[in-house]
Amino acid sequence: MPALGAALFDSQARASPPRGRRGIRGQLVLPEDAGFNEARSIWNAMIDRRPAMILRCAGVADVRRGIAFARANNLPLAVRGGGHNIAGSALCEDGLVMDFSRMKSVRIDPVARRAYVEPGATLADFDHEAQAFGLATPLGINSTTGVAGLTLGGGGNFGVVTSFEFALHPVGPMVYGGLVVFPLAQARDALVKYRAASTQMPDDLSVWAVLRLAPPLPFLPTDVHGQPVIIFANYYTGPTANGPSAVAQVKTFGTPVGEHLGEMPFVMWQQAFDPLLTPGSRNYWKSHNLAGIDDGLIDALLQSIENLPSPQCEIFFGQIGGQTQRVPVNATAYSNRDTHYAMNVHGRWENPADDDRCIGWARAFFDAAVPFSLGSVYVNFMTQEEGGRVADAYGPNYERLVAVKSRYDPHNLFRHNQNIRPAM
Ligand SMILES: Cc1cc2nc3c(=O)[nH]c(=O)nc-3n(C[C@H](O)[C@H](O)[C@H](O)COP(=O)(O)OP(=O)(O)OC[C@H]3O[C@@H](n4cnc5c(N)ncnc54)[C@H](O)[C@@H]3O)c2cc1C
C-alpha cells in the first residue's frame, strides 16, 4: 500500500506541474523513510497507528492536493495539528495523515488586536508572538498543545482549516498566580469552601483544584512529596498589585503545607504545568461537566484519590465561568453555559502492563460520578471509544452541526475526530 500510495501521488502530480518531489512543496514521509516512526508518534503513547503516508504540508496547495488524493483513492484521512488529542485522532491506520508541523506562523496585528495563525502552531508559539505586544487569547494549560485541535474542539468535522483568526485581549506581560497546597485530610473541607467561593469570584480570577500525589516541587517540604494532596492553581489577570488580596481567600481553605504565589510573566504561567504533561506517557482520560461539587461526589473523589493507581494519575476541577457563560448558547458550537466545572480524570502511567489497572481506576470514578454530573461533556477531553457522547458535547446545537456536516461533508471524509455523522 505505501509504495502504491507514493506512485499514485506521483501520477496525480503529473496532472499539474510539480513544484517539488511528487508535486508538493512540503514533504511526503513514507513508511520506508527514515524518521517515519518519529513522524507517526503523538503525545499519547497509547496510540500506535501506521498511516500509509504522512504529508507535511507547506501551504494550502499541499492541503488541496492531499484532500483530493485521499478522496480519489478512498483513503482514510487524518489531520494533525499539535498531535495532542487524547483519542489519537491525529493518526489513521493505512491512510493519509495531513501534518501541519511545518506551518507554524503566527502574525499579530496589534492595532486591530487580531492574530492570524497557521494550523501547526502550538500554544507556546501563539503566546510568544502575542505577548510581544502584551496580548493574549484564552487557550489551554499545556503549551505544547496545538492551537488548531484545541480551537476546533476534538476535531475538524467540516474540512481542513489552513488559517485561524483570533481576537486578542490585553494580558500581562506580568500576571499574578501560583499554587496553594493542602494535605488530602483537608480536601473535603477545602472543596466545600472552594465551591462556595467559586460563585463569588471575579472574572479576572480563575482557580482550579487538582487532587493527586504531590510532585517533588521545590517549595513543598520533602516529606510532602509523594503524599496525596489537593492543589489549588490560581491565576489572576487583574493588576498584579491586587493579586495577593485576590487569592487570599484560597489560603483560608485549610492550613497549607506549601504555597508558591507571586508575579510571573504570563508565558511562564502558560508553561508552568508542562513538566507534568510531557509527551510519551500512556494516558486515558474521562470527563464530566458539573454544575457544582456535590457532597456525594466528594465522597467518591476522596475514595478514588486514596486508591491512585500510579503517581501521575490525578483528578482535576477546571473552573468555567465569567464571560463564557454570557455568550448565547447558539452563538458557538460549545453550548454548555450551565457548566461550572469541567472535571477530568487523568489516568497517566508509563508501563503498558498497568493499562488495565489505570484505565479501570479512571472508569470506576467516572461511573461513580455520573449521578452528580450534568450528562454533558467537553469534547476536547473525550477518549477514542466515546463517539457515543458527541451529541452530549454539543447539546442543543448538535442538530445544527449535523445539518452543516450533511451539507459540506456528506460522505464523511473528515471522520478521524469526535465525529458528527452526516444525516443519512
Ligand atoms: C496535556 C494536555 C493538556 C490539554 N489542556 C487543554 C486545555 O487546557 N483546554 C482545552 O480546551 N483542551 C486541552 N487539551 C485538549 C486538547 O485541546 C485537544 O486534545 C486538542 O484536540 C489538541 O489539539 P492538537 O492540535 O494538539 O491535536 P491533534 O491531535 O493534532 O488534532 C486533534 C484533531 O483536531 C483536528 N484538527 C487539527 N488541526 C486541524 C485543522 N487544521 N483542520 C481541521 N481539523 C484539524 C483533527 O480532527 C485532529 O485529529 C489538552 C490536551 C493535552 C494532551
Image: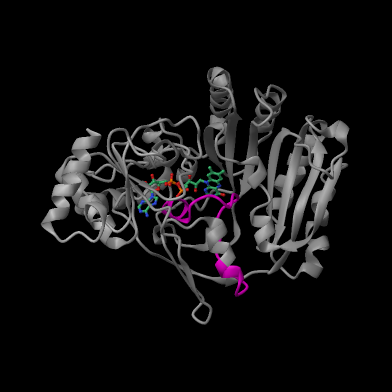
Whether residue 410 can be seen here: no
Q: Is 64 situated above or below 398?
A: below
Residue 246 is situated, as x and y percent measured from the top left of the image, at 78, 61
Q: Which residues are magenta?
A: 129-152
Q: Nearer the viewer, residue 186 or 124?
A: 124
Q: Check residue 149 for magenta coloring.
A: yes
Front-lying residue, 340 or 355:
355
Residue at image coords 16%, 61%:
17
Q: Position of residue 74 (x, y in %)?
A: 17, 40
Residue 111, position as x, y percentages in the image: 52, 82
Along the horizontal axis of the image, is 145 left or right of 413? Answer: right
Identify which residue, 59 or 407, lies in the foreground: 59
Q: Residue furthest bottom?
A: 111
Q: Is residue 215 left or right of residue 345?
A: right
The quarter of the displayed image where residue 231 is located: top right
* Quarter occupied by residue 372: top right
Q: Residue at x 31, y 55 (%)?
A: 160
Q: Is residue 87 visible?
A: yes
Q: Residue at x 70, y 46 (%)?
A: 195
- In the drawing, does residue 86 fall left or right of residue 247? left
The image quadrant where one finds the C terminus is top left
- From this view, report whether residue 92 is shown above or below residue 72: above
Question: Horizontal and vertical percent for residue 211?
Answer: 70, 36
> Does 232 appear in magenta?
no
Using the image as rendered, state which of residue 416 and residue 385 is in the foreground. 416
